Image (tube, rainbow, N blue to C red):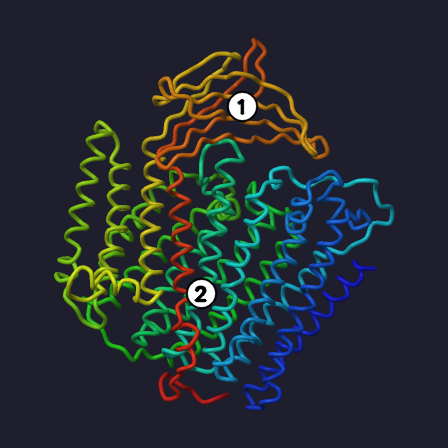
Amino acid sequence: MITELGHFALILAFAIACVQAIVPLVGAQKRWSGWMAVGDTAAGLQFIMIAVSFAALTYAFVVSDFSLRLVTLNSHSAKPMLYKITGVWGNHEGSMLLWVLIVALFGACAAWFGGNLPPSLRARVLSVQAMIGVAFLAFIIFTSNPFLRLALPPLDGNDLNPLLQDPGLAFHPPFLYAGYVGLSMTFSFAIAALIEGRVDAAWGRWVRPYTLAAWVFLTIGIALGSWWAYYELGWGGFWFWDPVENASFMPWLIAAALLHSAIVVEKRESLKSWTILLAIIAFGFSMIGAFITRSGVLTSVHAFANDPERGMFLLGITAIFMMGGLTMFAARANVMQARGVFSLSSRESMLLVNNVLLGVAAFVVFVGTIWPLVSELFFDRKLSVGAPFFDKAFTPFMILLGLVLPIGAMMPWKRGQMRRALGKLIPAAVLAVAVLGLAWTLQGGRSLLGPVGLMLGTWLVAGALTDLWSRTGTGGVSGRIGRLGRLPRADWGKAVAHAGLGVTMAGIAGVLAWQTEDIRVVQTGDSFELSGYTLTLNDVRQQDGPNYRATVADVALARGDRQIATLQPEKRYYPVADMPTTEAAIDIGFLRDVYVVIGDAQDGGGWAMRSYYKPLANWIWGGALLMALGGGLSLSDRRYRVAAGARKAAVGARVPAE
């Protein structure tokens, strides 16, 4: 009964979304306030109905209702409760239901908290958001129904993919989807603005919180996915340039560009057309990610489904929204005239450089991701594009971005002197060069990768601190320190986010330049050296888990005569899924990780073991968390909650309603 209720609620949500897509849009065009108000009510009802549907599916997984096809394929009665719940979105159908739930949630937030928006703009935003909901609800109902019953239910299920039975993967998809789908709101705001023919400072202030929230969620989601790949897959890496990884990274890059571009719209009413275009493209990349994950056109360990028919449906949705949005942009962009004028030596120019670097970097990732498909379709050649291409083509743009960011943050609006901004950054530059020299000396003259990465990281962190300090004005040190606490949260958020990028860059460079790897067969009781540490295999035993059997090793980690830790890497076997997994054991330190993986027993005795010494590994995810924290601080700035109501009716380009 509960399952049928969930199915009915899903269909009802589809009907409500259809009403929301049409009625407020017509009302805004005709200036009928009653029709425009329908959007607010419909957005709330649509979210409630989809939430009921999602709750019904979750209930079916929790109670192990194997009469439901989806539960049978993705759950098992012996599975821990956490993974029963996460099994709801650990598959194609359930993940799409989560997708539309978040679409509806963002639309409902615009209705509930958008009281400061002009009624016509809010109505159009809610209508466009509902159109996205209609498309994906139709996709679920007609091609990916999660509520299909089995005529003869089995006694137990097939279990969830063992790779997904991990805390990192329990929370990674919801955060990632919140980021993906959050960009739908920027798309809705952009299309609504194109319909109205108006983009002004108030619009830039309204759209920034949604963009910032989506970017923060994407940052957390990508970081969780990277951390999961690092410790779960047993390969010791943090980023594989996998197509699905890239599909989440491209919207992140475009959203970062959009954030900086929206600042220019808000402060100077410039780059309007560029900002609208970025808003459209950002959501386009999110839908491309959904297509790549579910179509099977590109091979990925992260893929949910391999179904060309459903992939074509998603491709059609992507084409309709992107072609529609870009066509409207081409027809209306000429009325989005920039009002602010700025010189080449200004913050606006530096933010434009920032946008170009992020945009080109995203394009490089897109080309590398999609090229195998293009090669096979048009040249009948199968090839793969791996890390060497991305490292060489992508890295230079990130280095330039790291060099530019502190300078851009110090430049004044409209017109300034580059020399003055650089003068304030001299201490940061001296510190960065000193770190470069120190790292080069300590490493013994090997690759420049590590020293340059530490230099960039130091430059970004010191530049962010310099920017904060410069905003305290002049006077005594104690007075300026007191003023630091009174700075707007957006200023703190920017500094923390930029510093986080520097920490991540330093971590990536440290791991890639200085990590060491050891692969060998180890007998019980044997010891070996790894970058100044001693690892001893004390014991290997068998252990039963809730729904798996595990081979567990006890590995003592010591440095000199001091015992540091006992690591317990595992190799698990899930009998229901007939699949093995690797659980790495990691001794985490501030400056390094020691990473150990146990392999199979060898014919001649002993066990295969792989171990790594990874300098600065945790700086990668620590920096990502700092970036997310910086975004959260900016999002909590009071100006986003209060000043959004200070719209200027006379400002902005207008075209007559058609």
Spot occupied by residue 381 in the image (x, y as percentages of width and height)? 50, 40
Q: Is residue 327 above or below residue 448?
A: below
Q: CA separation, marks 2 and 1?
A: 43 Å
Nearest to the observer: residue 102 or residue 341: 102
Circle 1 is placed at which residue position? Answer: 598
Q: Which quadrant would the N terminus be assigned to in this image?
A: bottom right
Residue type at mark 1: give it. Ile
Identify the image quadrant of residue 628.
bottom left
Residue type at mark 2: give it. Thr
Circle 2 is placed at which residue position? Answer: 211
Q: Is residue 278 above or below residue 520?
A: below
Identify the image quadrant of residue 277.
bottom left
Q: What residue is rendered at 41% in x and 32% in y?
A: 593
Q: Is residue 650 left or right of residue 413?
A: right
Spot occupied by residue 447 in the image (x, y as percentages of width and height)? 26, 32
Spot occupied by residue 176 in the image (x, y as percentages of width and height)? 52, 54
Q: Is residue 379 above or below residue 40?
A: above
Spot occupied by residue 562 in the image (x, y as percentages of width and height)? 38, 21
Q: Is residue 424 left or right of residue 275?
A: left
Q: Secondary structure at mark 1?
A: strand
